[in-house]
């Protein structure tokens, strides 16, 4: 479906190596108008995720405002995954510092942005969605200003943070449930989808040949720092967050299924499990579109072509 103007979007992130590539992909794509970036604590603490988001937007030559947000979930305590992303969240790949954050809290900025937006805005959540949950729980009427919510979250099967839960969903299930209950179009890229975007040394080497720009090389460097995932057989790692951005740029690379989705907000071992009813066994109304398959070669070709455009 050809669009005649760029999609206005906000990316809520926790860079994070895969978030970094997602931000660069968005910055390089004329189909998207990145109007704001909001940072949350997630992969690593908010101090690092904010610094990384600022550095990445400067590296990409973008003046998009970056807002500091929640450093912990709505309930419960913050827990990072530094062993995946490094203590600094960028796999130890030092980026030149970015500028200062935009003033104000991310949730307030999101509300102000939605309130005044001339057209509905797309929200991309590739972190624990505390900022998005806070903004919309405190002003639910703003849901009418949302065109679509695209989330990297959840799984219909095994988790990656616990046997039951994917990391973003586990980190703030209450915030995720707020979004699932909004009644707005939600698209979910879960672990079964992102596992198809398998980053291997060969794919990184192929990306490196596409140009010498700082952004492309930094993306390859952070990807090369990610440990191979035992869950995926130990050969490579899933490139999670760029899948959410790629959906907006090239939906033809995906197949999707409308489903009923809810998240377990209980205290037990199933906390953060996303119940994704792909076969309509519960007979509940569909509240999300779940991405099921990815043309991986097409995805990496798109990624390389876009990253090579950046400075
Ligand atoms: O489970 C993968 C997700 O958790 C990705 O968004 C990754 O960056 C982490 O935030
Ligand atoms: Ca993330």
Image (spheres, rainbow, N blue to C red):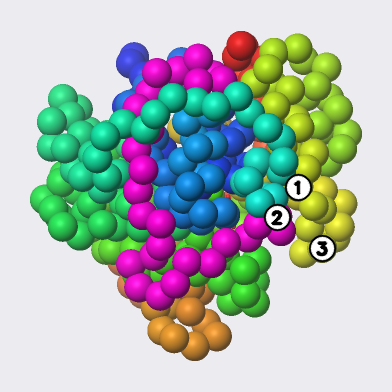
- Within 10 Å of the Cα at label 2, are there few (<14), some (14-19), or many (20+) other Cα atoms? some
Q: Residue 241, image x and y in percent? A: 57, 44
Contact flag, marks 2 and 1 (Cβ < 8 Å): yes
Contact flag, marks 3 and 1 (Cβ < 8 Å): no
Q: Mark 2 points at which residue?
A: 84
Residue 206, relative to residue 266: is it above or below? above
Magenta span of residues: 58-84
Q: Mark 1 points at which residue?
A: 226
Q: In which quarter of the image is residue 33?
A: top left
Q: Is mark 2 within 8 Å of ligand 1?
A: yes
Residue 73 counted in the magenta span: yes
Residue 213 counted in the magenta span: no
Of the 4 image quadrants, the one containing the N terminus is top left
Q: Mark 3 points at which residue?
A: 230
Q: Is the magenta stretch mostly helix, strand or loop?
A: loop
Q: Which residue is drawn at 36% across and 54% down?
A: 70
Instruction: Give how far apart the Cα atoms at labels 2 and 3 are.
Output: 12 Å
Q: Residue 43, image x and y in percent? A: 57, 54
Q: Which residue is drawn at 44% across and 86% down?
A: 267
Say which of 126 and 255 sits in front: 126
Q: Which residue is drawn at 46% across and 41% down?
A: 50
Relative placement, left or right, of 122 versus 19 is left
Instruction: Give how far apart the Cα atoms at labels 3 and 1 are.
Output: 12 Å
């Amino acid at each position: 479906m050809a669009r005649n103007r760029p999609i206005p979007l906000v990316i809520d992130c926790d860079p994070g190596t895969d978030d970094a590539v997602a931000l660069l992909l968005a910055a390089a794509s004329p189909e998207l108008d990145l109007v704001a970036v909001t940072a949350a604590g997630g992969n690593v603490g908010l101090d690092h995720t904010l610094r990384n988001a600022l550095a990445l937007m400067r590296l990409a030559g973008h003046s998009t405002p970056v807002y500091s947000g929640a450093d912990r979930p709505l309930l419960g305590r913050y827990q990072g995954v530094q062993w995946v992303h490094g203590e600094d969240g960028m796999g130890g790949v030092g980026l030149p510092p970015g500028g200062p954050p935009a003033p104000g809290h991310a949730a307030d900025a999101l509300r102000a942005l939605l309130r005044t937006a001339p057209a509905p805005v797309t929200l991309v959540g590739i972190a624990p969605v505390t900022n998005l949950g806070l903004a919309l729980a405190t002003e639910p009427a703003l849901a009418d200003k949302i065109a679509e919510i695209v989330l990297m979250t959840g799984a219909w099967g095994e988790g990656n943070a616990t046997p039951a839960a994917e990391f973003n969903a586990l980190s703030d299930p209450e915030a995720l449930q707020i979004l699932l209950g909004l009644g707005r179009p939600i698209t979910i890229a879960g672990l079964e989808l992102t596992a198809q975007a398998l980053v291997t040394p060969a794919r990184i080497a192929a990306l490196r040949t596409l140009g010498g720009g700082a952004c492309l090389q930094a993306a390859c460097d952070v990807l090369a720092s990610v440990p191979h995932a035992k869950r995926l057989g130990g050969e490579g790692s899933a490139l999670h967050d760029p899948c959410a951005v790629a959906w907006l740029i090239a939906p033809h690379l995906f197949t999707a299924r409308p489903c009923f989705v809810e998240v377990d907000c209980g205290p037990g071992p199933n906390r953060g499990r996303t119940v994704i009813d792909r076969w309509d066994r519960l007979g509940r109304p569909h509240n999300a579109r779940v991405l099921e398959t990815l043309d991986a070669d097409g995805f990496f070709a798109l990624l390389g072509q876009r990253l090579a455009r950046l400075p």
